[in-house]
Amino acid sequence: MSEPDGGALPPVPSERRRKRPVKVEPEAPPETKSAAALLPFIADLVAFVVLIGSGMLLGELLVRKSTGQVLSEAGSAPKFPPVELLLWAAPPVMLALMYLLLSGRKQSFGAWVRRRTAK
């Protein structure tokens, strides 16, 4: 396999040469959500449930019937939805939509907790 020029082999192209292995540092494991990260979510969830519950109580006061009675009469009403069901459902829906609007604008209770824990 010698060359007619003097018997030397041609140099090996750089692609064929073995390169030193590059040391790759292991990636840090993804951070798990700590209790501090879950606290704003839990605060929002509790506030949302309290608003829905208070809205249901307000709805009971509006129709002057209990929730169970309103729901049982709604299933057997000749025309659905009955007016009492709409009056009963209006306060919880209104309060839920208002809280979702505040949450979207970062003005909810969970956003307040997030700002307090960041300081």
Image (cartoon, helix red, strand yellow):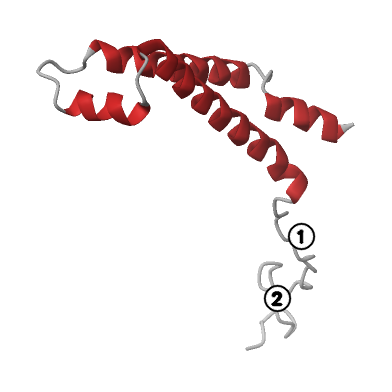
- The quarter of the picture where residue 25 lies is bottom right
Image: 45 above or below 4: above
Label at residue 90: none
Q: Is residue 105 left or right of residue 25?
A: left
Pick the front one: 80 or 100: 80
Circle on res. 28 = 1
Instruction: Identify the residue at horizontal 45%, vertical 23% (top origin).
Output: 56
Q: Which mark is residue 10?
A: 2
Q: Position of residue 89 (x, y in %)?
A: 37, 18
The residue closer to the viewer here, 98 or 18, is: 98
Q: At x 53% / y 23%, what residue is drawn?
A: 54
N-terminal-most mark, 2 or 1: 2
* Amino acid type, residue under disc 2 in the picture: Pro
Q: Residues within 10 Å of mark 1 (few under 14, many from 20)?
A: few
Residue depicted at x 72% and y 74%: 17
Using residue 90 as the reference point, say whether residue 112 is left or right of it. right
